[in-house]
Amino acid sequence: MSGGSTPAVTTYRVVHRTTYQYGSTMTDGYSVACLAPRSTDWQTVRSSRLTVDPDVPEIDTFVDAFGNRQYQFGVHVPHEHLVITAESVVDVTAREDPIDATPWDEVVDRLATATGATALETGWFRTTSLLVDLESLAVPLGALTRDVFVPGRGIVDAVRALCHEIYTTFEFDAHFSNVSTPLVEVLAERRGVCQDFAHLAIAGLRSVGLAAGYVSGYIETVPPPGQERLVGADASHAWCSVWTPEAGWVTFDPTNDHLPANDHVTVAWGRDYADVIPVRGVMIGPAAAQTLDVAVDVERL
Amino acid sequence: MCDAVDTMSTTLGPGAASLAPTGELRRRLLDPDSLPARQARADRLLASEGAGHLVHDLPVRADGRVAAIESRPWRIDPIPLVLDAGTFQWLSLCVAERMEALEAVVADLYGDRALIAERIVPAEVLASTGRYRVDAVGSTPHRWLTTYAVDVVLDASGMWWHVRDLVDAPPGLGYALLDRSVMSRVLPDLTGRADVVSLARFPTRLLRALSATSDEDSPRTVVFSAGIDHPSYVDHSYLAVQLGVNLVEGADLVVRQRKVWLRTLDGLEPVDVLYRRVEDQRLDPLALAAEGSVGVPGLLLAQRAGGVALANAHGAGVLEDPTVRPFVRAAIDRLAPMTQTLPEFDGSADSFSTVPLAPGTIAPDVERAASVVRLFAVHDGERVHVLPGGTGRVLAPGDDPAEPTACVAKDVWVLGWSPPPVVAPPRLPQVDFGRSVPTRAADALYWTNRAAERAEAMARTMRVVSARIEQDPGLASMSGGAWCERMGAMIDRVMRHPAPDSISDASALADRLSDVGDGVAAEIGVLLTEATTVREFLSVTTGRVLSHLAELRSSLQRRVTVVDDLDAVLADFAALAGLWQESTVRGPAWRIGDTGRRLERCLVVLDLLDGALGTGADRPDRADVDRADFDRPEVVAPVLEALLAANDSLVAYRRRHRSEVDPELAVRLLVGDASNPRSLAASIERLAAHVDDGEGALGDDFLERARACLTWPVDRLVPELRALVDEAGTGMVGRWFSTPVDPIPMTFVGPGSMA
């Protein structure tokens, strides 16, 4: 991916449009949107803008406990649809491959006794979270991690191996799972989507004592040869990050079996998907079927 | 005071290892001649005092937790637990210190996080429990803990143990006040003479503490409850009455412009302080790891923006998490070491001090039992105030003090202690509560009154028919059972039976009558449930009448109904109606309730006319009885008498007309005679007055059309006016209350999945 011809900085425009159609008229609605890309060492946000239809009088923003910017707003007039559009332009600097050969088991020891900033930074990410229930996964995870985490193996090397293991032994299947499919089922059926693979990798890393987080964002898609790039055909994407003593947080993408260089746009991170759901909320009105349509467009400028 | 504290140790000495009353007090409390009567009175008062009347119907435990085993009513043992002044002084010092220490711990966990950085409380433990509220990290409320409760237990050697802290929405203070209210009536002379410290000032202290959480000079405070399904609802409701503030539920509140507002009949009114009885995880459905649907969307945004204060602050409940609790003591030692500490109960102590239960009354199999004592404290921004009392929970043999299984409560008396000087009450907002009616409360007041009117009509009809047949058994067989048929029809109509079979003999009528008891009981149940949610709008006397009705209801359900029981029920309904007229401030709340009552009264009169006169069109069974039988004077007169009596209008008729009851005159008295308060005309004119007062919710042409109906013959009047009244009632409920308010979650889709 990071060949010599790749420019050092890539600029992306991302448009993420979420459309709800309610079967009847809602009198009130409240939403939280986690759609603003965050600035990182390798990513600069040039602009980011949220628009809501029906128009809302104000959009509040706040920074959550993980440093992500969240939008919150309410539609307090009768409405039958809700369209939330986030449009952002970001510069992504290509990253070198991370280097850290610290044995993973040594990293575990350091984390287990960490104090100060390291404890604050990593403690969140070492244990069961809402969607990553280590207890229910303990036995099936053993098969996944046994061959990867051999004593003394370097941390980055081990992460690459885990990534590869998931990539090769699980099948991507956009129709198999949804947000409520439990991870044990993904493990049993060996199929799922990027979110499942990210949660799986996180579970594997946490189960051996490492600190791993969930990253939400976008990936540039390249159309098949000879075809036009389809606007809006992209999707939001999920990958992971793991804490290393030398290279800091190292991100990796088990769905694509690689370590992101410059093709990923980072929006937010948290313990798992539940911390960084792109759009969530409640509406008030008669219960009726609601439909949801998400269109994402990632364009290289 | 310091000397007193220094000489007091955690061990009070073997001789003092009891919470039992001693000496003269003991002799009088345990007097076997008066104990059973006291127990009976305590049981009755618990049901009748203030909001207590639903206690026996709800799965409550004295501390408010859902009964783990089964739902059982709780009772108050008339023998209190007794703390001497020295013991209470020392315990309250421990409580105050611990509350301050816990405040420091919570503030650190969401603020500087030194405890996490130093691994005193491992981040991993916090990260894996939903009770550590991620959304509260970095928030800076005035105080985290405005209220606090702690369970303690005394062992047989005289050692006090700390059992657990309650810091989220500490339950039980309402019960403590309720227990005391009951006890002071069970033992009026004793509580006065034995130098028992009064709890009367504590609600003011609590209100002051709640006000201190807000920047507003004169903050508007409400009690925020999860509603009548919450096991501690009685606790919440009793507290709201004691504090004199509105009891609200999530659906009553709305967030706009980063502030919280109460939905009232007059529109949105600002709320500054939520005394929340709702647990952390359920406060706001938009929060991370939110649970349930009782919360207010946007509430936490409002709190973060300073638009509302929560007491306790969102996040405080983390210290109740069983995985966090083991680290609390070390956290306290690190941040705020205490001078007075209780050893922490870890399940190992097996010998608790025993206290007397009233022999032969509560739990006769347990001669002596230990109790866990819950103490309550508030922080008013300057210092901690500990309630000079509390609640005791009796422990069954082998009970874990943290999870008592017995449902026996004991009042806790502090003897001979002098409380600090009286505090000035906080300046309260100049809110006219006569005008401020949450829409949900309006809804409940409306249905309370409708249920009362309907239940009264059912009971009176039953009373009238039963009494008539008792006095004159021959009526049953008269004219081939024509009288019976009419009485059966009146009962069916007033009971709202959809498609009744007609009856024509005494035994069928007796069967029908015996069902009415259940019907009245069910209607009283609706009345009590609705009334419970608006306890703060009803007078204390009304509460007593309601609880008396609750007792009568059980006898109605047991089918031992006799005319005397019905008379008692009717007297209660008369009392309720009178209190509603004479003890309720005129305002929107009153008008809405009264509108409900008048609408229902119209329907009742129509139902009874329909049944007695056979005006209904759908009577396929009428062929069973010769039509001419109905027109015989010996049938007509007793039917009309029963119709008038069931509408409480027989005396009015007799005073006006000396003749045998005449059909035309009887109908006129019930329909068009506005001087008879039971007539349709009177009810409609009353509704007209409400419309004039500005509650034009009945619809513009309702009155015009209703008045026109009154001039029609009965068989046309009944269906037309009934349709009109039903429509007005539905329209009114629709316009005012039926806006959906329960949040529905939006669906979401994960990355990579097909939507």
Image (cartoon, grey):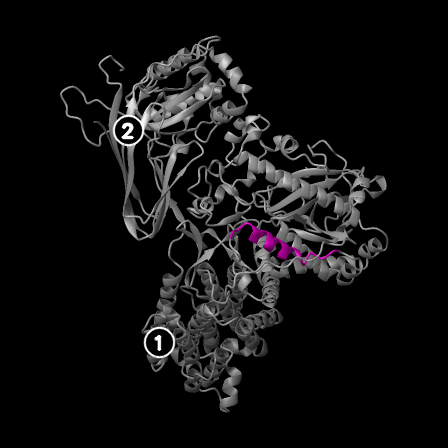
**In front of the other: A112 or B304:** B304
- Between the C-alphas of marks 1 and 2, the distance is 67 Å
- Residue B396 position, x and y percent, is 71, 42
- Residue B602 found in image quarter: bottom left
| Disc 2 packing (10 Å; few <14; some 14–19; many ≥20) | many
Q: What residue is shown with label 1?
A: B703
Magenta-highlighted residues: B197-215
- Answer yes or no: is residue B399 visible: no
* Picture residue at 17% right of the left edge, 26% below the top: A229
Say if B266 sits above or below B17 in the image. below
Q: Residue furthest top?
A: A152
| Disc 1 packing (10 Å; few <14; some 14–19; many ≥20) | some
B83 relative position to B745: left or right: right
The amino acid sitting under disc 2 is: Val
**In front of the other: B269 or B427:** B427
Q: Chain of mark 1?
A: B
User: Which element carries disc 1, helix, strand or loop?
Assistant: helix
- Residue B136 position, x and y percent, is 49, 39
- Answer yes or no: is residue A73 visible: yes
Give the position of the C terminus of chain B as an image quadrant.
top left
Say if A261 sits above or below B519 in the image. above
User: Which element carries disc 2, helix, strand or loop?
Assistant: strand
Q: What residue is shown with label 2?
A: A90
Would residue B198 be counted in the magenta stretch? yes
The amino acid sitting under disc 1 is: Leu
**In front of the other: A183 or B585:** B585
- Residue B290 position, x and y percent, is 46, 40
- Residue B321 found in image quarter: top right
Q: Chain of mark 2?
A: A
Eye-nearest disc, 1 or 2 = 2
- Residue A98 position, x and y percent, is 37, 14
